[in-house]
Amino acid sequence: MTNSWTDIRNTDLVIVMGGNAAEAHPCGFKWVTEAKAHRGAKLIVVDPRFTRTAAVSDYYAHIRPGSDIVFLMATINWMIQNDKVQWEYVKNFTNAAFIVKDEFGWSEGLFSGYDAEKRDYDKSSWEYVVGEDGFAQVDMTLSHPRCVWNLLKEHVSRYTPELVEQVCGTPRDRFLHIAGMIGECSAPDKTMTSMYALGWTQHSKGSQNIRGMAMLQLILGNIGVRGGGMNALRGHSNIQGLTDVGLMSNLIPGYLNMPTEKDSDWATYMSKKGFKPLRPGQTSYWQNYQKFMVSFLKAMWGDAATAGNDWAFDYLPKLDVANYDILRMFEMMDKGQVNLYFCQGFNPLLSFPNRGKLTSALSKLKLLVVMDPLETETAHFWENHGEHNDVDTASIQTEVIELPTTSFAEDDGSLVNSGRWMQWHWAAGTPPGQAQRDTWIMSGIFNRVKKLYQDEGGPFPDAILNLTWNYADPHEPSAEELAKELNGRALEDVYDLKDPTKLLAAKGKQVANFSQLRDDGSTMAGCWIFSGSWNEDGNMMARRDNADPDETGAYLGWTYAWPMNRRILYNRASADMQGKPWDPTRKLIEWNGEKWTGYDVPDISPTAKPEEVGPFIMNPEGTSRLFTRGMMRDGPFPTHMEPFESPIANVFNPELRGNPVARVFADDLAQFATSDEFPFVATSYRLTEHFHYWTKHNRINSALQPEFFVELSAELAAEKGIEKGGWVRVWSKRGSVKAKALVTGRIKPMQCGDKTVHCIGIPLHWGFMGAARKGWGPNSLTPFVGDANVETPEFKAFLVNIEPIKGEAVS
Amino acid sequence: MTTDPNLDSPRTAVSNPPIQPMPVNLGPGDVVRASAMPDLPAPTRELTPVAKLIDVSKCIGCKACQSACAEWNDTHPEIGFNTGSYQNPADLSDQMFTLMRFNEYENPETGDFEWLIRKDGCMHCEDPGCLKACPAPGAIVQYSNGIVDFISDNCIGCGYCVTGCPFDIPRISPTQHVSKKCTLCSDRVAVGQGPACAKACPTQAIVFGTKEDMVTHANARVEDLKSRGYDKAGIYDPQGVGGTHVFYVLQHADKPQLYSNLPADPKISGVVESWKGVTKTVGLAAIGLAAVGSVLHGLLSRGNRVTAEDDREAKELVEPSLPAQDKEA
């Protein structure tokens, strides 16, 4: 989230598209009801199904799964055509004025530089024209034909209300009504908030869906302001924390990059991290990258990381591919290239696509270790559960070890919520049976591996032998010790860079925040963005002061929000070029002539003059980006791409299938279906009664939603002879499931041009372990392909078939 | 505020309980009516009437209320089947005192589709049909704050309350042979807490307080709904049963039956009403002797011949290994 849950109450308009907040985030959704009750805010829902969120909305429109980019680009086009643009914001706070290279272009669904053989773009043309002074060229009048604004205008001109009707199946009048409601929020004193989740991410172009809404929000001037923002609703209490500490194969804690094979040494690696400002006088905060990286390496290897050995840079693994995401891991596993797999708090047998392939892959492992508080399907993948897990147990040679772990309620620690709030929690109970904390298990493994290296040696033991491990109990580091390490401390006295006589942090003290981190080895910090969360003032995450001066929703004394306890990112953009709030009734920060003051921690140097320094300090431009240059694999603007399995050809280029640069493994390509065989569009989702595959182990949750079902329209049910509550078989090219039929008016057939598209909803939550009735998950059916940028699987749009079957009688 | 010892009833459900235990503030002296007990002594004081307001327009159907209800009352709803609906369990039961009922509605006036989700459960009528129908002395009581409570120890499981209820709420336990329903968490209210469902509701669609405060809040909600185009929004607080201590804000107050058959004008069954003024225990004896109309007979034939046999059957259900001679005894 750019903003916070509590800030949603400040909005005038909520758009829930690519998510179902009431269903999947019912507690956070209370802030929508607050905005409605106290500000008269309106709620728009755009979704293939009339959801629980839609049940309390002011306006709803349906949309065909996987067609969101058309809807979003058409909305942007409508804003431009109808002059619903926050012009001062767009000119000054976005890269609208930047001039783009002449070579950049788009035709037939593809941007310049496409190589069909490599399934990749040469992105060199997706760049600004840089002058001899080293700065990007701009035209503040926006009249230059090659400025970003005019390129955008041309790009979105293809996306008309008629195209929305044809491709999305959204009736034209519904689209126009929504565009009108959104357009009102281009006024400086009106804001819209976007709440989205996996309805946007789980597509082969998920990142571009989100880009589309981010661009719309920038054009409306709704980023950095109260009641605005791009608000990703994280689907797990600590999934934000997971990404923050870098549990992605290509990231290091704090969104630093894991080096690749090409980064043969420290100098090469750092040469790509210059982040020289692209406009005069801009901040470009990533210029501090080296401070954060060196502090991370010092946290890892302490005294063994020195200037002489490039801070132990060589100890880090170097990626030989873009990343080792879960799809790649299971592809390798299925090819017999993985011996041992550790599965920590994770149930991939039900969570990742194409369950048949997952079972096959797990069966080829030598050893599978599962650390989990519950008995997961993954840990029991080898057990035959009849039709619900019909495996030949005797033929599976994988050794499986289940290590019971504590749950969040049996442990101290912090959870990072969607709004980046790091909230400390205390154990509420003692672990049952032999359950142990994950830290105990991992310490046990580490200490044994280290001893093996000490006793027996081995190639390159340095990274293991030199790992810093200074905990009171080396067999179980405490949550407090780990939290302090993530915050970082001074290894030598740290002085003010501008005033070398001013001591900021004495040797051995916790650093106050990441502004005190240094690149000379005098500081350490495990995760720079967490710096400030446990400093010499104590555990800031444990704070519970709910004071909220002037009721802004900031709650600065409640826990700790990274970075710097800032509640709304880019909040400098809440004020105009003179530093005055766009909306005085929704003041966040303002320039008092000398410095920035207000309700939130300014997202800019406190003394940076408003006319001089742009609000988007993490970008070398100082502005936000409507045009993302070469930073995304599939284009600098979002362009419409169909799902890999779609009933409709890409309207711009019928030859294109899915995202033209998404990674597809050869065996999986053969398992993609066409609508000739599989005529119906399926989409998957959560239900509010359950949490993933956990709560089916709980009897009350299981009573509230006991049995696997699929949802379909009354029209499709009539066509197929399917009865309400009857049994159906749903199958894709990859698998088949049996479910109860929930026939509903909440799903309607959609008319896309001359084609009627039927949608089938497939909730997750059922498996073969736990208290609820045995069932299947949608992943028995879904295709093995992910987003081109981040590999999130395409769970939200795929093709299936359906038929009524006889099942056991309903009692 | 809730736990202020100077207040006779809690004013909200959202606050947390105090660290120190509170004295119980709801007892026999607060009972204003009890089933089959015409000579009940007058209450020692008059409590402020309380109410639970269910704002259907804010409800997201998450079932947190159902979950909280089962947790607080320690009931064990069965893991049933999906019958082609989001409504689970399929109906109220002696183990599920409240239930989200889901109804789909194509609004002919606006062309909009609506999903109307209503939390069903005891309405705590000011004039409770169940209490009037109940022949067991003290099995159903009404407190001066408006709560209608079932006292299981006095219940004979006859099922008259089921027929007496205009909302079809009470359910007879097949094993314990007592009638069960929402208590409005009288045990929580007694110690300054609001009902568990209201406490758990994430959108505050369920709120609790004095009836007066809840009506004020409901009126404001109705105004908001009218501003959003729901011209017929209103309060459902049916006067046919004297008003209720659980009441609704509805988007379409002119058509309550849209909400999974919420009765438009609920009234206590005429059969039950005819008992008014008669001492029911005496009346029952009279029925045993005199032939009565079939309707009345139907109402009562499930009657109070139950205790001995049913008690034994219930024991068999829960303890199937009882020795044979015990079964025959």
Image: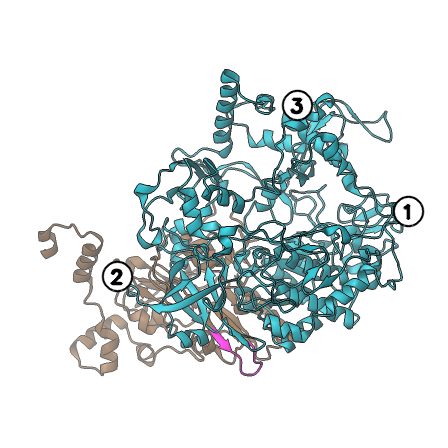
Q: Chain of mark 1?
A: A
Residue A116, above or below A751 = above
Range covered by the magenta-colored residues: B104-112
Display colour for chain B: brown
For residue A302, the mark is 3
Instruction: Report helix, strand or loop for mark 2.
Output: loop
| Mark 2 Cα-neighbour bin, 10 Å: few <14, some 14–19, many ≥20 | some
Display colour for chain A: cyan
For residue A586, the mark is none
Q: Residue at 88%, 59% (x, y): give it.
A: A140
Q: Chain of mark 3?
A: A
The C terminus of chain A is located in which quarter?
bottom left
**Residue A504 image offset from top left, x and y in percent:** 78, 28
Residue A282 counted in the magenta span: no
- Most frequent secondary structure within the magenta stretch: loop
Q: Provide the residue designation for mark 2.
A: B174
Same chain for labels 3 and 1? Say yes or no. yes
Task: Give, as a three-letter code, the residue at label 2.
Answer: Pro
**Residue A669 image offset from top left, x and y in percent:** 51, 55
Instruction: Report helix, strand or loop for mark 3.
Output: helix
